[in-house]
Amino acid sequence: MHAEITAIGAIALVGLAGVGAQWLAWRLQLPAIVLMLAAGLALGPGFGILRPEEQIGELTEPLIALAVAIILFEGGLTLNLRGLRDAASGVRRLIIPGALLGWGFSVLALHYVAGLSWESASVFGGLMIVTGPTVIAPLLRQARLERRPAALLQWEAIANDPLGALAAVLAFEIVLVLRAAESAGDAMLDLVLGIVVAAIAGFLAGRGLALAFRNARVPEYMKVPVIFVAVIGVFAGADALLHESGLLAVTIMGLVLANSRLASLAEVRRFKEHASVLLVSGVFLLLAADFDIAELGALDWRAPVFIAVVILLVRPAAVFLSLIGTDIPRADRLLVALTAPRGVVLLAVAGLFGQRLAAAGVPDGAEIVPLAFLLVAATVVIHGFGLKPLARALGLSRAVPGLMILGANRFTLALAEALTKAEVPVILTDTNHYRLSPARQAGVETWSGDILSEAADHRVELIRYNTLLAASDNDAHNTLVATDLAPEFGRENVWQLRRSKEDSPRHALPATLGGQTPLGEKSLGELEQMMGEGWRVRVTRLTEEFTYDEWRERHPEGLLFAVIGPAGLQILGPEDEAKAGADTRVVALVPPDAAPAGGGEEDEAEAGEREPLPEGSAAEEQAAEDEADASEEPAPPKPDRRG
């Protein structure tokens, strides 16, 4: 017998359990949805501590509806149409015909295999398009995929998140109007009216906010609250004008804002990320806690057969058919075809539509929820633990995550060249195309342009890199880049060379700006002087015969930069101790008189002794950048770091 929990206590418990599950998933490197599912089932059906219908009462459904509306707004906010236009043909194929094929095949499987009515199958089939970025991004980071399959999966997830929900909303509208209308003409009129009302409401709200923000009609500190209230207002207003049109309206509102090119959109995106972490976990916990385990027992043999058909037939058929005629290799197609984990958005929206289909008189509407639970649990577990081995078997997995280096100079070029020889993914970026010429000649991957530009957003594959080193000759730019990309990489993975005037009180910056300092707090000027004197970057493998202590004894003046272990590259700060064991590699700067390899020491790579880097005229720079723009393929968007 448990002490009675009030409504406030139940909401607090949902928040604590949901956010706690996401944090634990981050620590354990597991898909968060697995732990949220376990937490919800344990608190609800398992121990009976959380009973939303009793403790929160009639507010449960409207709270879930509002949360889902904000989640779908967030989905629309991620859909940048310019990025989709720039995407490769394979990505466009997965988004346009692929989504429609997936919807159609899913409806057929739901009707003929799972036994659902056409009404329920059409709604749930639309939702099955969704492979949201909140599930895909952590899996891609763990699997460390090659560029092309990562781009395909990430872009598909970003685009199909709102499109799947949109398909379900449209199918649901059709079901409602067909049941309520007296004739086919009335049904068509109601459907068109619903779409028009939602589209106009969402478009006007999005455009109105964009104009208000652009013309400084809303102060900076009020933009996030205004957006939050506007989403709720549009959802409620559209629903009041025409029942169930609110979800479509907020999705369109998010899409309009995403393509408004607002300077303050970064703050908006930060709001949606924070809100989504709370709402996704909250909705998921409420749905899981309110789930009746007996409903799973009511499913017959057709349910597991349906799951197998979805994973082995429906998804592969949609992918292979949509990619016909593209130049995507067979291994990439197979990996994408066998990877489609469903997550929080599908389950949250399925729970909402399942209840509303049942309320509308659809006999098997309630069966959507247990099928959604089974589909989510099966795909997350299968793909969560199977994607990495599958990628390795197909030769599409990278060994270790890499390093992004800002600024081309003699030190960073030697570092990038040595790490590239050691098979650690590296990208060297600089605003001067010609300064990157030696790096390109050495086989180092480069990006010419501002790494914070919109072009870099679409063309630099951030998901391949988990560490940033800002080492250009512009201290202010280093600080700007390190601060801006810290939320993407995690502040513990962002490093910046010591600024030249860092010790001066007039130039000291707060801890919230910039990155950590590596290399014994050497500045770029000092490192460049050392490289001019003949210092080199050396990568050395440690073994049981040649330990770190022996390496340090042979190189007492060596400046340790990083260690490369099973988890990848780890840059060391001035107070960090090198935890280097057997089969670990150390990356260090060694002086010109350093002892050559021998006595058990195995040097894997070395680079240094290079002339100052070339410069180019403004016209030459522009011509080189135009040529690069014409030849480069888009990369997947910045990874969503939520679990």
Image (cartoon, rainbow, N blue to C red):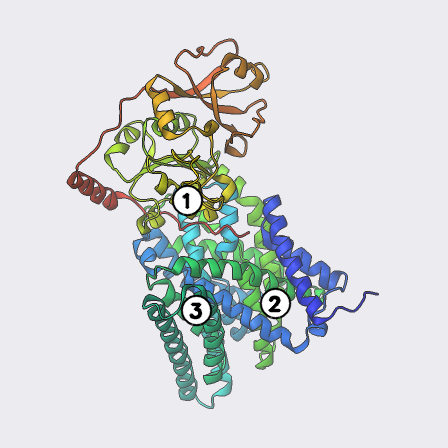
Q: Which residue is mark 3?
A: 251
Q: Residue at x 21, y 42 (%)?
A: 627
**Position of 616 relative to 97 (above/below):** above
**Whole-percent x and y of residue 505?**
44, 39
Q: Are the residues at dot 1 and dot 2 in contact (C-beta closer than 8 Å)? A: no
Q: Does the rendering let one see residue 140?
A: yes
Q: Which secondary structure, mark 1?
A: helix
Q: Which residue is mark 2?
A: 369
Q: CA distance from mark 2 to mark 3?
A: 22 Å
Q: Residues within 10 Å of mark 1 (few under 14, many from 20)?
A: many
Q: Nearer the viewer, mark 1 or mark 2?
A: 1
Q: Name the one closer to the observer, 625 or 38.
A: 625
**Whole-percent x and y of residue 133?**
48, 55
Q: Residue at x 59, y 63 (%)?
A: 372
Q: Mark 2 vs mark 3: which is more N-terminal?
A: 3
The amino acid type of the residue labelled 1 equals Leu
For residue 462, which numbered disc appears in the image? 1
Q: Which secondary structure, mark 2?
A: helix
Q: Quadrant of the N terminus?
A: bottom right
**Whole-percent x and y of residue 19?**
62, 56
The amino acid type of the residue labelled 2 equals Val
Q: Nearer the viewer, mark 2 or mark 3?
A: 3
**Position of 232 relative to 492 (above/below):** below
